[in-house]
Amino acid sequence: MLPFTVCSYAKINWMLRVLSPRLDGYHDLETIFQTISLHDSLTFKASSSLTLNCSDRTIPTDERNLVMRAARLMMERYETPPLEIFLEKKIPAGGGLGGGSSNAASTLLACAHLASRRPTDGELAAAALSLGSDVPFFLTGGTAYATSRGEILQPLPDRGGIPLLLLFPRHRVSTPEAFKTLKAIRSQGSSAPRARSPLGLDACRELLESHPERLLNDLEEPVFRMRPLLLELLGRLQRTEPRWARMSGSGSTLAATYDYIATRDAAADELAAQCPVATCETITAAEAQLRIEK
């Protein structure tokens, strides 16, 4: 079976509401995940020991990398053989697109094909959650409503094939710092959204289908205070008349959807002088499923 290569798809958040603080120090969230066609690639080869190499030399390839942790977990629990893994990066690190979580999920699924004892779906989900709150979503992909820390998932009707434009500001954002700034803003009585209870699945589905422009990201205000350039870039993006435009996750990637590919491409040409851009599309859960390429 070895060697083989798999795609590891990115995600955007159609919305992100930060709800009440939790006892574990995190916040409850309400979000809508969407898989997109932008992807990394992971190549797996037989080896005498577990190793990871990456096309981006700024990314650690030791146990700090979720790929290594996922592969080692599968070796220890399900007797996956040691592998030489190469990660070809296209998803910007630290951009709010879930690249690390997607890489981890793809590694779990790829290793499951090689395991002496195949894990059940429930075991894979538990393994994914042990690696990070976003990782379980990437086991299935598509469009999903998520609550708790983002790990309680309910599928929504697929929204594949929507033209998408991504802006990659050069400034990266610390997720803990974004939440810390949001806490400070809310404690000061700012006009920032003070979401404390979820809208619910039906309300979010209705907004997504009929009024996507009303879907908000509660982390935008704190991140824009930390990085004013991002607010300026979002304004320029919105002037290209997208159907929807938001920061993804905790940033710094900005995302916008368009009704037509030509409109999306014209916006990309206009904004490419401001910062790096990428054009892609939303994809369905079926399209996001792991496919092994020899």
Image (cartoon, rainbow, N blue to C red):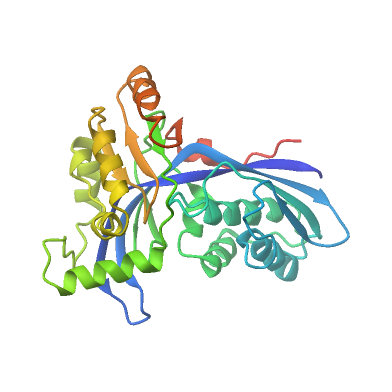
How many numbered marks have been drawn onto this rendered protein structure?
0
Left of 54 or right of it: where is 18?
left
Rendering coords of residue 53 (x, y %): 73, 53
Q: Residue furthest top?
A: 262
Q: Is residue 151 left or right of residue 138?
A: left
Residue name at image x 39 percent, y 68 percent = 176
In front here: 118 or 96?
Answer: 96
Tell me if residue 108 comes above or below residue 26 in the rendering. above
Q: Look at the picture and state if 277 lies above or below 47.
A: above
Identify the residue at horizontal 42%, vertical 51% (top origin): 171
Q: Residue 148, can we see it?
A: no
Closer-to-camera residue (23/126)? 23
Specify the quadrant of the image occupied by residue 126.
Answer: bottom right
Position above or below: 147 against 264: below
Return the x and y of residue 265 as percentages of the image width and height: 39, 22
Which quadrant holds the C terminus? top right
List the single residue furthest toward the bottom: 23
Percent coordinates x, y for residue 92 in the rendering: 52, 47
Residue at (49% x, 58% y) in the render = 136
Q: Residue furthest right?
A: 48
